[in-house]
Image (spheres, helix red, strand yellow):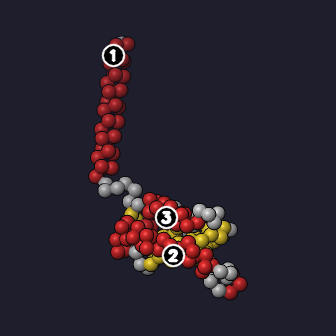
Amino acid sequence: MAMHVDAVQNAQAISTKEKEKALRASISNIIADLECPFNVPIEMYLSVRELAVALPAFGEFAIDGPDNIMKGIFEPVREDLSRLIYASLGTTVLNASFAWAYLGQMILMPTVFIDIPPGTVADWADLESRVRKMLGRATSTLGFIIDVQFQIIH
């Protein structure tokens, strides 16, 4: 009887291993068929990202001299940033702007807003990282970072 139980368990183990192997192969094939597994629609990316709220440039909330600070950060890299976005997204970008923004209702930070048409698919985390790196060169001596926000334009 023990031999029969061992034989059944061995058969089940082989069957389970074969199923796992087939499942791994199937998942590998699906991933291999994807152009890039990190390319997702902009809507999906934004659904898990905290959104910044641009600070009005007028009234009691105005900050003295933000245009000069923004020019000092944004202008030196404007052309490189434009090339980076174009290389990543083609002609889908409608606009990119720079403003002070609240992130999480408490943190005020300079932010680049990049307008994206609905349904645009890209590796948003990678693009955000590359934009941050580019802008980081201009802010490294200032002691703050720049937030990067993609926003859907309807």
**Quadrant hosting residue 39:** bottom left
In the rendered structure, which disc, 1 or 2, sits on the residue that comes first in sequence?
Answer: 1
The image position of residue 94, as x and y in percent, is: 41, 78
Q: Which residue is mark 1?
A: 4
Q: Which mark is residue 24?
A: none
Q: Nearer the viewer, residue 110 or 71?
A: 71
Q: Earlier in the sequence, mark 3 or mark 2?
A: 2
The answer to whether mark 3 and mark 1 are in CB contact below 8 A is no
Residue 95 seen in the figure: yes
Does any portion of residue 104 appear in the rendered image?
Answer: no
Q: Tell me the tag on residue 75.
A: 2
According to the image, label 3 marks what residue?
Answer: 134
Q: Please, what secondary structure does the residue beneath circle 1 have? A: helix
Q: CA distance from mark 3 to mark 2?
A: 12 Å
Residue 27: image location, x then y, percent: 33, 45
Amino acid marked by disc 2: Glu
In-front residue for pair 16/31? 31
Q: Residue at x 36, y 17 (%)?
A: 6
Decide if residue 76 is on the left or right side of residue 118.
right
Give the label, 1 or 2, closer to the camera: 2
Which quadrant holds residue 5?
top left
Q: Which element carries disc 3, helix, strand or loop?
A: helix
Could you say which is closer to the camera, residue 28 or residue 63? 63
User: Could you tell me how many numbered marks the image carries?
Assistant: 3
